[in-house]
Image (cartoon, helix red, strand yellow):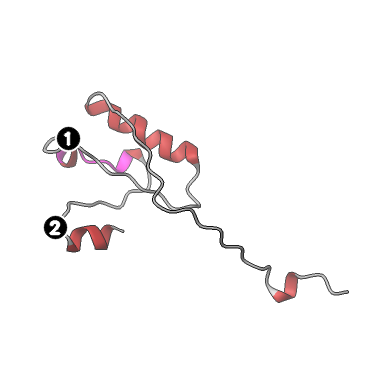
Amino acid sequence: MVEVARRQGIAAHLIDDGGDIDGAWIEPTRVIGLSAGASAPPALVDAVIDALRWWGPVTVREYEIAREHVVFAAPAAMRRRP
């Protein structure tokens, strides 16, 4: 997503946690988009939002763009044999 945003001229940064946020990214903007992969624990996302509060009040709006219903089968070696 970072690469896609940057190709559109949008400042984007890949972080592992709230400690990776650079204040220089925050000061010139009023709106921050935050996305996380499905494997990101909600507590980590909440911690990043809490870290953003250091620079001022934060209003959080969640948007669901698409809901996926993909089911992956277990690898053949792990499936039960009848």
Measured along the vertical axis of the image, is residue 33 above or below residue 39?
above
Q: Which residue is mark 2?
A: 9
Instruction: Give the amino acid at mark 1.
Output: Arg
Q: In which quadrant of the rendered view does residue 55 lie?
A: top left
Q: Which residue is mark 1?
A: 30
Q: Residue at x 41, y 46 (%)?
A: 64
Residue 14's tag is none
Cα separation between marks 2 and 1: 17 Å
Instruction: Give the amino acid at mark 2.
Output: Gly
Circle 2: is it few (<14), some (14-19), or many (20+) Cα within 10 Å? few
Q: Residue at x 61, y 63 (%)?
A: 71
Q: Is residue 21 magenta?
A: yes
Q: Is residue 61 magenta?
A: no
Residue 29 % position (x, y): 14, 38
Residue 60 % position (x, y): 33, 32
Residue 53 % position (x, y): 29, 27
Circle 1: is it few (<14), some (14-19), or many (20+) Cα within 10 Å? few
Mark 2 element type:
loop
In the rendered view, does 74 fall on the left or right side of 70?
right
The magenta span reads 19-24
Q: Residue at x 34, y 38 (%)?
A: 18
